[in-house]
Amino acid sequence: MDLSLIQKEILITLITLYRQHSHAIKGEEIADVLNRNPGTVRNQMQALKAIGFVDGVPGPKGGYNPTALAYRELNLSNIDQEATVPILRNGEPVPGTWVTEVDFTTLCHPDLCHAMVKIAGSVKTFEIGEEIAIGPTPVNKLIIRGEIYGKDEVQQSVLISISEMISLPKKAIRNYMSTPLITLSPGSSFREAIHLFTAKHIHGAPVMKGGELVGIVTITDIAKGLDDNRPIETPVSSVMTSEVVYADAGTKLYEVVTRFKEQEIGRLIVVENGRPVGILTQSDVLGVFPSL
């Protein structure tokens, strides 16, 4: 059955709101999202109910629920089992909107790469010229960034000119860590730490005591200690960070990428069977995908 444009908009908005809140959605809520007259939405909901796309729920907390037929009509029949692929604007997810399909319309052009991005949610919230980001996708962890140059409200799509695509590696961090682990002891002096950092061309090292990880010290920690007029023979234990960020060696690289930014760290310790085996730094990450 061919739905009108307004019926598709209403149905997609109903599904989006229902997915977010898991309860019957009132016509007024849909009207608010679409910026349409509530009476118009109510009339269309009655029509959609008559042809089996929505169910009405009576009572003060009532409203409308989408039916399985609605999901099939919009090719969203397995939406509850699908992973949500976000679409971001200015680094923030667009509320009530996610990506369902990306079709590359040009790949062979030497200068251009365009794609049609089908979305669940209202296309009207997007403007020509906006920079957006899509992903990561669930299987290949693909991230796409680009600029909107067109919209197709019938197909619920935005057209983008792609500026960047990144596929985050799914290998474990043991494949990217630096090893063997170069360490210091709590009693190592600032002088010894500086010599080690210079000789090994590193900017930090874990502090180990009897095989146990007790902290991490960086060249910045040493510099601050010297700025505070501490002697060059001061032990690194006095300036080290005792709360060490670590990750299991089997953790996928894409899973730890955001931790560097969120926790404002430059490195983390890689452990296997509870034992430190390596270190992963921002430089290691940027070496894999320098555009991040």
Image (cartoon, helix red, strand yellow):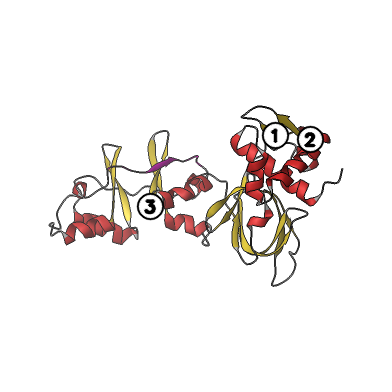
User: Which residue corresponds to mark 3?
Assistant: 264
Which numbered disc flags the more N-terminal residue, 1 or 3? 1
- Examine the image and state in which quarter residue 21 appears: top right
Q: What residue type is labelled 1?
A: Tyr
In the shown orientation, is residue 42 left or right of residue 265? Answer: right
Mark 2 or mark 3, which is nearer the start of the sequence? 2
Give the CA distance from mark 3 to mark 2. 51 Å
Residue 203 visible to the viewer? yes
Residue 245 lies in the magenta-colored region: yes
Residue 260: which disc? none
Residue at the disc numbered 2: 49
Q: Residue 132 in the image: state x and y as whole percent.
A: 60, 59
Q: Which of marks 3 and 2 is in front?
A: 2
Bounds of the magenta span? 242-251
Residue 277 drawn at (x, y percent): 40, 42
Q: Is 266 positioned to the left or the right of 59 in the image?
A: left
Residue pictured at 63% horizontal, 40% vertical:
17
Residue that appears at 52% across and 43% down: 252
The majority secondary structure of the magenta stretch comes to loop
Mark 2–mark 1 contact, CB under 8 Å? yes
Is disc 1 surrounded by few (<14), some (14 to 19) or many (20+) residues within 10 Å? many
Q: Do the residues labelled 1 and 3 touch (CB within 8 Å)?
A: no
